[in-house]
Amino acid sequence: MRLGEMIHLEWQDVDFERQELRVTPKEDWTPKDRESREIDLHPTLAAHLKAWKTVSAQHKNVVPWDRRTHQFSMMFSAFLRRSGIERGSLHSLRHTFASHLAMADVNLLKIARLMGHSNVQTTQIYAHLQPSSLREAVFRLPAIQPGAAVPLNGAAQA
């Protein structure tokens, strides 16, 4: 989710039964891509949100914040520093999310959809790969036996 989407997420946008979040335009806010979308809710996050709802159900918004994104970002960065993480931001979580999906071999089109991107070119900026995942990709190739025919472009060579 984008920061603006998170800050404007209301409890009515959380569907625990279907395990999804709905990003929808509000009276005072419109999503970046101007359209509504659904985001699948990971079971671990669903459990945390259910627990959070018991504490904050009196608030309309999931994140009880006055909707000033810059202040929220500054607070989050300070939290990271206190946690021993010198560099990072809420936005870096989007990069991390996309990268972990890419390293888990999730299709780039699916990652784009989850990120709310209208094209995969934008998603490619986010989906960084770790060198170890590139190495793993190479080692997935089958071993080639000396003297064996290797199919090229789907056609066996004699």
Image (cartoon, rainbow, N blue to C red):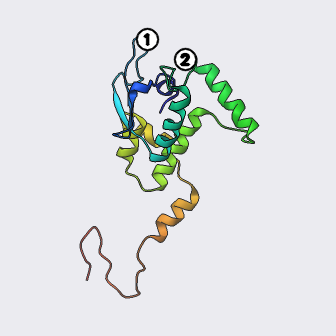
Give the farthest residue toward the top. 28
Dot 2 crowding, Cα within 10 Å, few <14, some 14–19, many 20+: some
Residue 111 position by quadrant? top left
Which numbered circle lies on residue 28? Answer: 1
Give the farthest residue toward the bottom. 147
- Given residues 154 and 120, the one toward you in this image is 120
- Given residues 72 and 19, the one toward you in this image is 19
- Given residues 33 and 53, the one toward you in this image is 53
Residue in view at x 75 percent, y 42 percent: 84
- Residue 71 in the image, given as x and y percentages of width and height: 64, 20
Secondary structure found at label 2: loop
Q: Using the image, determine if residue 102 lies above or below residue 68.
A: below
- What amino acid is found at the position of numbered circle 1 in the picture? Asp
Quick check: 136 left or right of 30? right
- Residue 68 in the image, given as x and y percentages of width and height: 58, 16
- Please say whether residue 127 is visible from this viewpoint: no
Residue in view at x 57 percent, y 55 percent: 130
Quick check: 90 left or right of 145? right
Do residues under tags 1 and 2 come within 8 Å of each other at their CB atoms? yes
Residue labelled with disc 2:
67
Dot 1 crowding, Cα within 10 Å, few <14, some 14–19, many 20+: few
Quick check: 158 left or right of 95? left
